[in-house]
Structure formats: C-alpha cells, structure tokens
Image: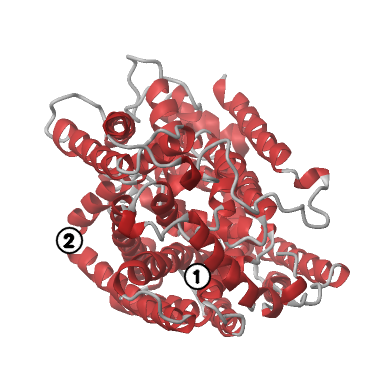
C-alpha cells in the first residue's frame, strides 16, 4: 500500500446507500465468479511453482493488469480521493512522479535481475546478493507487514460496508476473509492474479460513471476549477503551485521533498522492492513479459489518477468545507458521498461491487505474497528443508489459512485500537525505503559485501523511524504535516542505509565475483539470453519503447497542471 | 558463510528450472478472456435493461443522464471485445514440456 494517508478510515453514518435487489444481484454474481475462478485455477496447480508463481507462465497483459490491480486497493482509491479533497491536485504527484519512473525502472533495469536469476521472491534476491541475515530480516519484516496490511484492508472494508450497506462489521470481515481464503487456497497465485485482472475492469466500470456524473454536476472541468479556485484558492487545482522552498502549502512539502522523497525514495522503494507487486511480474511467462508487466501497468496508472482525484475535487467543490467536522463528512467519504448522490440502482450495484472487489484485491495481493515468502523463504529454507515439492504446496495452502485468520484477527484488533494500527502502518512503510537503498547499492556496486546488506537494511529502517517518531513527532524539527514528514523520513532512511552499507563494505570482505553473476549490473545470469518468443520482437512490445513512452506521457500530463 | 554456501544462485536456478519443467500451469490454465467477456456481457445486459426500464427519478438523480443505459452498453462492448479477441486469437494448444519454449 502506497497511500500515505494514515487517517483512520471512518465514514459518516448517514452514507447508507439506497441499494435494492438489483444491486445485490450484481454483487452476488461477482462473488460467484470469484469463487469459480478459484475452482478453475485449482486444476493448474501441480507444483509449488504453480501455486506460488503461477508456474512462471502468464502473458504480459494479465500480469500487467494484475500489477496495477494489486496496487489499486480500496484503501488507495478512497485514500487518494480523500487526499484530493484535502490537498487538491497535488494528488497527481503520487501517480506521475511517484509511480511512473519507478515502474519503468523496475521494468527496464531491475526485471532482468529478478527474472533472470529465477528467484521466487524479493527476499530471495537478497539471499543471493548478500547473506542469510539480510534474507531473514527482510522475509520476517515482509511477512508481518503483509498480514498487517491485509488486516487493515479488511478492517477498512468492514467500516465502508457497515456505513454503505448496513452490515455489521464482523459479518463483512468474516465474509470477505472467507472468499479471499477460498480462492487463494484453491488456486494459489493464478487465482489471485486472475481475480485481480477481473477486479481491474470492475473497478473502472465503478469509477467512470462517478467521474462523468460528478463532472456534469459541477459544470465540467471548467466549472470545477472555477468553484475550487473561489473556495480553496488558485493553488488547489495546480500540481506545483505553492511548492517553492520556504513557501507554505497544505501538503507541507516543497518541490525538492516531493521529487526526492516521494518521487525517488518512497516510490522506488514501494514499486521495485515490494514483493506484493514484484510477484506479479515474476509470474510472467518469459523475461520480455516480465519486463513488460510494470510497463503495461504504467499506462493505466497515468490515467487512473483522474478517476480518483476528480471525485475528491468534486466533493470538495459541492460541499462547503468538505472533510471538516462542520460539513458532517470526512475526507474519506468523497467517493461514497457521490455514489449516494448520483448513482441510480444498477450502476450503484456495479460501484458497490467495484469497491468490494478493490478491498479484496488489496487483501489478496498481500495474502498471496505472504504465503510465498513464508513458505519458500522462511519455512523451506530454515525450518523444514529438503522435503518433496508436494509438501510445500500443502504447506502453502495451510499457511494461507493461517495468514487469512491472522489478518482477520488483525482487522478485529484494528477495530478496537485504530491508532496503534496507523502507527504500525507508518512503521512498516519505512521498511521498503532502506530495502531500495540496499538493492541499488548492491546492484550497482559489486564491492558491497555480504554483510553490508543486513546492516544497511537495519540502520536505514531504524533511521527513518527515529526521524519520524522521535525527531518529527516530538517536534525537534518543524515539518508542517505528516505527509511532509513522511517524505523527509524516507530520504533520511535511504541515505542512512546507503552510507552504512558503504562503511560496512569497506571493513568486510567482498563477495567473490563468481557468486555475483547475474546479480550485479553488467553481469548476466546463465541462460538469461534466451531468444525472444515468437512475436515479442514487434515494435510495440519492446520494453525500452514502452518504458520511455510512459515517462514521456506522464511528463506531458504535468503540462496542463503546471501553468 | 561456508555453511550456507549451498544457497548459491545456481541452486535456485536449477530448482526453479526443474519445477518449470513439471509445471502444469501453462498447459492447463483456462483462458481468462472468456471469464471477463462472459461477466461483462452479463453485467452489460442487466444494467442496459435497468437503463431501458428506468423511471424519471433514476435519470434525474444522475443529472439527466441515463447512466444505466450508457454504462450497460459500455460494459457490453467490453465483454464482446474480450470474446471476439478470444475467438480471433484462441489459446494456443499446450506445448509438450520437453520441447517447450521455456
């Protein structure tokens, strides 16, 4: 989860939607199809590689859409709409600078290492490049974070469903948990990925009518910007207005911390080392498809920002002081508010289905990456080694059950201690950042020693946390908002991790060159130079062209928001 | 690190290559295009019918747009697109593993 808005998910109680039998039919059909995919995918599971990585066999368009869908969880959709209602068009930064460059970097630079070395997970890459301590630390932290985020998604779902449909929270938690459990236990990653692709289209079908009708209601884009300029000031509908160093804006960040903190450190950390994302690319059928996974995902990502930002802006324009206690609405209510105001039965059912689908996507992505890391990186490596492959498939299914139960538990815990949860979430968000530092240094500097990985990871994480929880929260330095502090802490974590790695490397033995084949820039894994599959040499399938095309398009999107 | 020297890249490489040989996914997985196509055609029909039978209240709520009709038609077209794609480019028959492209 990249959404850095850690406000607890609360919705106003008066948002009950006027759903009827038609809407519930649409929802019911969706749940039936989700389960059907689980049963169908079950037939494809024969080895552990099938269960955890879809047998590395999927075409690029499927892994690409799953890649975007795994990120498009409902916490992201509601959170980014909330972000837009609160901060305005600054939200585009989370997409155009805070996602596209990192996704392109993953596809063009990092996938050859990930895919070519045939690792099954991101922590396994650290095992090969560094040593078992870096591997254990990253595996364990990732496993905890995945369960926590799955639980937070489930809890957020329960709150939304309670507000919109009137189901008690525990019913929503148990029902959604049971469906995710069923389809992942049955079909493993294939089932999760297939459902994610389906979810992607349902989510689009849910958001597009809201955007169209919302814009119509405020008098089009022109009417929207006029209204917001009058009520919130001219900077509210620009991307860079008020972000000069020293000037103040509600985001509490200037262009430098946006570019470095969000655009470089946070974004690269999330997109290139978060296994819940990278796993989708690793399940592709060959290196070219693996590289194209994040690149294909980049194109929808550029435009999805409009689908989440416009509802937030419309809500801010329609309701005076939207999000403040005076209006009776929270920022998170933007999309549910417009659903209630604008959608008739039918499309309303699609929108509810889309939201629930997005919650389940967010949860399933974390559960399916958790079971892979727990089984292949922790259990098969350090606890029960050398058993036959079928044992690990059975264990993977068992640990999926355990993982889902743990996230259901986390969700119930979150409903009583939501503050602790948002702290924990912030805490884990700092873990990807030093991970990225370790990857980058390890990949481009062959002298980085085996021991440096663990120490870089540890000190980077601790430094980011100390900066956020001690230096910022105690007010030792003054940063105007949590978001701004988040960006600065990420930069601190990255720099600390990288510096410690360099220092430790200078005092410890380097890894022998023959163990670094295919893990350091400029070397290739044996066998990676396989000939391209038939049709992969078509110009529109060339990773370089796709990647740079996405960067240019994202940059061009900034133009109308910059002047 | 001698005791962990067996975690070399070659081992991971060999293990995963072996599993890829035995993998069943490529051969047996069903085609997702049929599912997306089927679901969206079904949704498209349901929502389009809702749009045709909608009263004035539903249209007024949606700012004078018959949103059910338009969304229904859009979903129907998307569903038909996936089914047509499946028809024009059917799933290739499974390749025997020993001479597979992998």
Q: Which SS class for mark 2?
A: loop
Tell me if residue A72 can be seen: no
Q: Position of residue A149 (x, y in %)?
A: 34, 59
> What subunit carries mark 2?
A
Q: Position of residue A170 (x, y in %)?
A: 29, 77
Identify the residue position indicated by label 2 in the image.
A417
Circle 1 Cα neighbour tier, 10 Å, few/some/many (<14 / 14–19 / ≥20): many
Q: Residue at x 46, y 63 (%)?
A: A365
Tell me the quarter of the picture where residue A205 sits.
bottom right
Circles 2 and 1, Cβ within 8 Å, touching? The answer is no
Position of residue A186 in the picture relative to residue A346 (left or right): left
Q: Residue at x 57, y 72 (%)?
A: B19
Q: Position of residue A328 (x, y in %)?
A: 30, 51
Tell me the quarter of the picture where residue A58 sits.
bottom right
Along the viewing direction, whichever of A298 and B96 lies nearer the viewer: B96
> What subunit carries mark 1?
A
Position of residue B78 in the picture relative to residue A14 (left or right): right
Identify the residue position indicated by label 1 in the image.
A52
Position of residue A144 in the picture relative to residue A545 (left or right): left
Q: Position of residue A100 (x, y in %)?
A: 56, 38
Q: Residue furthest right?
A: B88
């Amino acid at each position: 989860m990249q959404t850095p808005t850690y406000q607890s998910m609360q919705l106003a109680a008066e948002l009950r939607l006027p759903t009827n039998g038609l809407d519930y039919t649409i929802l019911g059909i969706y749940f039936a199809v989700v389960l059907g995919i689980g049963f169908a995918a079950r037939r494809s599971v024969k080895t552990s590689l099938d269960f955890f990585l879809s047998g590395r066999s999927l075409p690029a368009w499927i892994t690409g859409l799953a890649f975007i869908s795994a990120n498009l969880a409902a916490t992201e959709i509601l959170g980014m709409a909330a972000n837009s209602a609160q901060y305005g068009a600054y939200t585009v930064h989370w997409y155009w600078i805070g996602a596209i460059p990192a996704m392109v970097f993953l596809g063009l630079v990092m996938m050859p290492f990930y895919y070519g070395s045939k690792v099954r997970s991101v922590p396994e890459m650290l095992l090969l490049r560094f040593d078992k301590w870096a591997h254990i630390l990253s595996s364990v932290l990732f496993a905890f974070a995945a369960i926590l985020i799955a639980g937070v998604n489930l809890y957020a779902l329960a709150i939304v469903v309670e507000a919109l449909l009137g189901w008690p929270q525990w019913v929503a938690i148990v029902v959604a948990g049971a469906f995710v459990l069923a389809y992942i236990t049955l079909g493993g990653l294939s089932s999760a990925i297939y459902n994610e692709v389906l979810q992607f289209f349902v989510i689009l079908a849910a958001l597009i009518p809201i955007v169209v009708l919302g814009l119509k209601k405020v008098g089009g884009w022109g009417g929207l910007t006029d209204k917001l300029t009058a009520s919130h000031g001219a900077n509210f509908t620009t991307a860079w207005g008020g972000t000069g160093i020293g000037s103040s804006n509600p985001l509490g960040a200037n262009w430098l911390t946006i570019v470095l903190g969000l655009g470089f450190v946070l974004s690269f950390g999330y997109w290139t080392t978060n296994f819940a994302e990278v796993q989708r690319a690793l399940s592709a059928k060959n290196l070219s498809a693996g590289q194209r996974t994040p690149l294909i995902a980049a194109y929808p990502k550029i435009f999805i920002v409009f689908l989440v930002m416009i509802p937030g802006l419309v809500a801010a324009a329609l309701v005076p002081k939207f999000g403040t206690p005076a209006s009776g609405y929270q920022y998170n209510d933007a999309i549910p508010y417009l659903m209630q105001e604008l959608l008739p039965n039918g499309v309303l059912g699609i929108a509810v289905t889309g939201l629930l689908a997005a919650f389940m996507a967010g949860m399933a992505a974390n559960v399916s990456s958790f079971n892979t890391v727990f089984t292949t990186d922790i259990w098969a490596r350090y606890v029960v080694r050398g058993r036959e492959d079928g044992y690990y498939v059975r264990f993977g299914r068992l640990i999926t059950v355990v993982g889902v139960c743990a996230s259901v538990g986390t969700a119930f815990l979150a409903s009583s201690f939501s503050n602790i949860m948002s702290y924990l979430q912030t805490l884990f968000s700092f873990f990807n950042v030093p991970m990225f530092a370790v990857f980058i240094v390890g990949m481009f500097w062959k002298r980085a020693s085996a021991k440096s990985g663990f120490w870089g990871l540890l000190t980077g994480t601790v430094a980011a946390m100390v900066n956020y929880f001690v230096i910022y929260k105690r007010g030792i330095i003054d940063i105007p908002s949590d978001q701004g502090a988040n960006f600065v802490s990420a930069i601190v974590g990255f720099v600390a991790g990288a510096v410690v790695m360099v220092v430790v490397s200078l005092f410890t033995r380097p890894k022998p060159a023959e163990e670094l084949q295919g893990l350091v820039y400029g070397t290739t894994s044996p066998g990676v130079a396989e000939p391209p599959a038939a049709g992969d040499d078509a110009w529109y399938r060339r990773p370089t062209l796709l990647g740079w095309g996405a960067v240019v398009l994202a940059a061009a999107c900034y133009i109308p928001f910059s002047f | 690190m001698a005791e962990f020297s067996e975690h070399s890249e070659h081992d991971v490489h060999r293990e995963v290559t072996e599993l890829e040989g035995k993998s069943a996914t490529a051969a047996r997985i069903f085609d997702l295009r049929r599912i997306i196509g089927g679901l969206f055609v079904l949704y498209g029909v349901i929502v389009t019918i809702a749009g045709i039978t909608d009263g004035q209240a539903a249209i007024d709520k949606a700012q004078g747009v018959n949103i059910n009709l338009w969304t229904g038609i859009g979903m129907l077209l998307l569903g038909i697109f996936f089914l047509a794609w499946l028809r024009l480019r059917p799933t290739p028959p499974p390749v025997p593993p020993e001479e597979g492209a992998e």
